[in-house]
Amino acid sequence: MRETLLAIFIGLFATPLLGGLINGLDRIITARLQGRIGPPVWQPFYDVIKLLSKEKMVVNVWQAFCAYAYLSAAAISVVLFFLKSDLLLILFIQAVGAVFVVIGALSSTSPFSQVGAHRELLQILSYEPLLILVVAGIYLEIGSFKIDDIYAWGQPLIFKLPFLFIALGYALTIKLRKSPFDLSTSHHGHQEIVKGVLTDYSGPFLALIEIGHWYDIILILGLCSLFWATGWIGMIILVAITYFIEILIDNVTARMTWRWMIGYVWAMGLTLSIVNLIWINLA
Amino acid sequence: MAELSFLLVVFPMLAACSCFLMRHNTIYSLIVIISGGLLIGSAILLIPLVPFSFSPKSFLGINIHEILTAADFLLLFIILYFGVKYKNWLINSLAIFQIVLLGYLEFFLINGSETYPIIYCDNLSLIMVLIICVVGSIICVQALPYMKKHETHLKIGVSRQPHFFFVMILFLGAMNGVVLSNDMILFYFFFELTTVCSFLLIGHDKTERATKNAVRALWMNSLGGAAFITALVFIYTRLGTLDMQYIIHADSKSQLVILSMALLCFAAFTKSAQFPFQSWLLGAMIAPTPVSALLHSSTMVKVGVYLALRLAPAIEGLFLTQCVTIFGAFTFLFAAALAVGQSNGKKVLAYSTISNLGLIFACVGLNTPESIAAAIILIIFHAVSKALLFLCVGTIEQHIESRNIEDMRGLYTKMPLTALISVMGVITMIMPPFGLLLGKWMAMEAASSFLCGIVMIAMGSALTVMYWARWAGILMSDPFAGKFKLEKQPVLTWAALFSLCIGVGVLSLLSPWIYRWCIIPIMGSDYLASYSTDYGIFENAFGVFAVLPLSLVAVAGFIIAILAVKSATHSRITMPYLSGLQTEEPRVFKGPMNRLITAEAGNYYLSSIFGEDKLTPWINLGAVILLTLVIGGAL
């Protein structure tokens, strides 16, 4: 019981702090790679606090609903992750949040929101099958979808599921909104569709979405960490390296079109996944 | 038992006839409402009686078997009559083929000394009866105000509603007959009766296109009927009985029996409008919307998956079962892809039905305890959610006179409550903790060890999210927030929409108990039920889905979000961002030279990839190859 409460507490309160911190570090490293100094590491928190204190403004009242629904779904999925629940269920709940962001954006009539929402859907379309196949691969290897069974497994999964880890990398890049897949909205303010899917969210509601995004980041990084679930050190090193590669990719690639994204992610990601699934099926 | 079965099967037929004879508006409306109530009542009274089986010996003093034989032939001659009337040689030849085979079976093979029960009702039949009676009756009741408007709109002089309700209620009786039959000949009779009913309903409006689509539905389903009767001849030749329960558990590895199983699967595919037979269900949209609602949710297409589910233990371990999985997963994926390319709301619903039925077939084919449970859960929740969505679209269509999704943009301004209920319907299709997602979760966990299946199901599931989310979003696309003026609808329409909407929520909440009380007994000795459902949490050796806790959290989240909406109504409402000088009009901005420019946005339908004309030929080709695999693999 105490463990459960602790897991819920960590999932609810520690996760956004960690997510914001990672975001802050990301901004510093990105700045250094571009020859800038970058903001202080706490900048994401300053941003969110400022947004929270702003006046509430909405285009459509249901945007408020969608912002809250996104935040709840993201938080629930992370809590379930810390409760070591079912991976597939966690993915489904994470998808609920993603869908509500889209519905909220579609509820505004601004073309920027609308186009951003549709691009977001295409992004979901690109990464969702990969995530499911990653989970299916883990099941094939250890015979369970439950996270506690993964922690109980004797050896790191990455040795048996290397290609699926790369496929997960594609999903991670899309989820982190990094180039070349930052189609629906971007961290950088120079996008052709303004802020895309987030254009008409503002003030406190935008802050909620930002916090939800921190939960999301932790969830996907958590998924990565499962590939080295045998020890803390290996886990942290694997996640750190993966994230650093994400930052590098973000800095050396340009934004591409959705056609390219779907074609590339499905062709490469699915091929890698299927090859890896056949490998464990036969081995 | 006998009385209840009579009420469920024969009574609707009598009620249907009285609808037809008493052509006064009030009288047949009353008959429809009363028979709906009676059907729901008898279905509920059936619950404590299952499982049971019996054989009525005679009806009004005539041997039941003789009545059945006569009715079978009569039905086939009716089909032949329609074939001749519409000069369709395919229907004619299929009808004659069936008459010949039925004659051979009845007069040369069957010796008449069978003692097996004709009616058999277990939990699977019970679930089907409940779906048919409850959802079907709700649809029939909603059809009353709908048809009134429909005929006013079409300016029909002499009302054809008595004919319409005659077939609708007859349909419910026929469906109850299908799921209660144990005698395969009786099953075949009701199977054909649903074909004829759907033919009559699709062609109801008597326009040229309606007739054409109805005739197509008739020949495609006759193909299924022909496969069915062929399978019966093969089975009788080898096993010497048409007792369904015996056939399922005969465990015969005889080639002829396996082939007839494949033929029965083929019949199920035609009924459930799987590729390449999807065109009859798409063509059925020409009919008034309650017909589509009935065909898609509780009747007709559910016959196919019901039949496959019944046969599942018989095909376990065969190559055939894998073929069914591949075929189902293929349909799931590509029907979802076609739905993405559609802007016609009813077509999106139709493809989504085909896609979901494909998933159910895939589950049946996987043939594990989890996947069978998934199939049953999917059948239940698909019926309710799809009926809800069809009734919503029908109501919307009568209001805005379009079924195009683009025309439903910002429907929230015009009909807020209907729009919200539609969004709710969409949410029940794609989000946990609602039943369809529970079924999909079970299906995916069961399919994970079947490589080909999981890849197609994973892709199809992502496509599914895309076409639903897009639709739900633009229903709410509204620049004037905060206004909420309730639209006017007939009481019966609201009653139908609300009961389905609440029903799907309550059923989802109860799903662990539905599983424990209804689904575990169905699996019986054939499968080892694997989920435990303590505290409303589904758990087995490799997965866990906390239905009840998640539902409670979801309800809490919903309340918080609704409170947020309420408080947001008092906040400042701004204009959507248009990257120009804003005007009073939310969609218009001042561009260069002070010109007023209207900003517009449309959905991505990606028709260059997912267009019907692009994909359909290839999909049909692929489906024909897979069907050949299903039949050929059984040889």
Image (tube, helix red, strand yellow):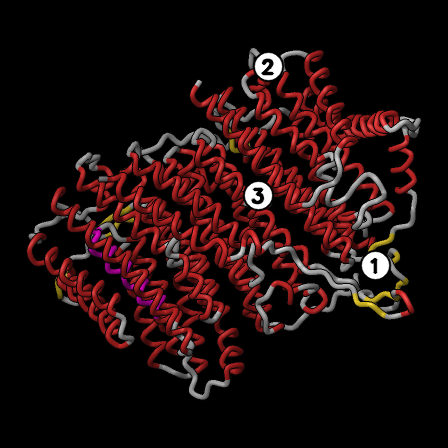
SS state under label 3: helix
Question: Which residues are drawn in magenta?
Answer: B183-199
Q: Which residue is mark 2?
A: A156
SS state under label 2: loop
Residue shown at the point (8%, 50%) measured from the top left: B113
Q: Which residue is mark 3?
A: B462
**Residue B509 percent across, percent down from the top left:** 56, 44
User: On residue B99, which mark appears?
Assistant: none
Chain letter of the residue beneath label 3 in the structure image: B
Residue B441 is inside the magenta segment? no
Between B542 and B117, the one nearer to me in the picture: B542
| Residue type highlighted by circle 2 | Pro
Up-down relation of residue B16 to residue A40 (above or below): below
**Residue B311 percent across, percent down from the top left:** 29, 43
- Crowdedness near tag 3: few (<14), some (14–19) or many (≥20) residues, C-alpha within 10 Å: many
**Residue A83 percent across, percent down from the top left:** 65, 25
How far is mark 1 from mark 3, CA to CA? Answer: 31 Å
Residue A178 visible in the shown view: no
| Residue type highlighted by circle 1 | Leu
| Residue type highlighted by circle 3 | Ala
Q: Nearer the viewer, mark 1 or mark 2?
A: 1
Q: Which residue is mark 1?
A: B578
